[in-house]
Amino acid sequence: MSQQLSGQDARQVSIQNVLGQLAALEDYISRLQAALNELETRIAVLDAAEKALYTIENNAEILTPLDGVGDVYARAKILESGKVIYHVGLDIYIELPRDKVVELIREERASIARIADMYRRELAQASQYYASLRAVVEQAVSRAQQRQG
């Protein structure tokens, strides 16, 4: 025994479907924005690291974080500014010439920038689709109000 929806019931189901899509899009857009913010923060950190590498000199006194987040610092002296210890992944660190580390930082920054650009494009498309769906809902609400009023 199959039941058919009346015109009004079908419109209500359709609007509920669109509202569900809007909610899902809001969540997706929010997650994209959060990921993009993390990428942009990483780019800023890499930029700061590259700049710092060019400002350090032998015997320069610096503050270095002891806790990884910057709440606890110690004074330290740069013993050799031409070499830097660099994290290559999986908790592995190697000592490399400063210029090589700058090269690696620039490569990582370029890679992250490409990913951030992809996220920006996806965010723009999702936002545009969200705006068009929202306009459909607003039109439907407006028409319903005109019929009632």
Image (cartoon, grey):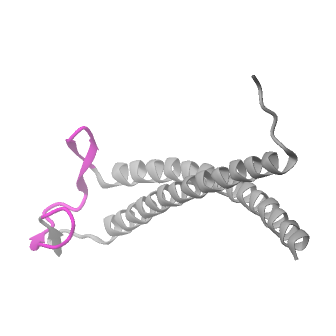
Which quadrant: the N terminus?
Answer: top right
Q: Position of residue 34 (x, y in %)?
A: 48, 59
Q: Position of residue 52 (x, y in %)?
A: 32, 69
Camera-side residue of 94 and 30: 30
Q: How many labels does the image show?
A: 0
Q: Hey, which residue is sitting farthest top in the picture?
A: 1
Instruction: Please tell me which residue is depicted at 38% across the width and 64% down the height of the picture.
Output: 45
Looking at the image, can residue 20 be seen?
yes
Q: Hey, which residue is sitting farthest front in the picture?
A: 1
* Quarter where residue 148 is shown: bottom right
Q: Does the magenta stretch include residue 88?
A: yes
Instruction: Please tell me which residue is depicted at 56% across the width and 52% down the height of the picture.
Output: 28
Q: In this view, does 97 lie to the left or right of 12?
A: left
Looking at the image, can residue 122 be seen?
no
Camera-side residue of 10 and 109: 10
Q: In this view, does 121 lie to the left or right of 61?
A: right
Q: Does the magenta stretch include residue 45?
A: no
Q: Position of residue 38 (x, y in %)?
A: 43, 59
Q: Position of residue 105 (x, y in %)?
A: 40, 53
* Quarter where residue 69 is shown: bottom left
Residue range highlighted in magenta: 67-96
Camera-side residue of 40 and 21: 21
Which quadrant: the C terminus?
Answer: bottom right
Q: Is residue 12 left or right of residue 145?
A: left
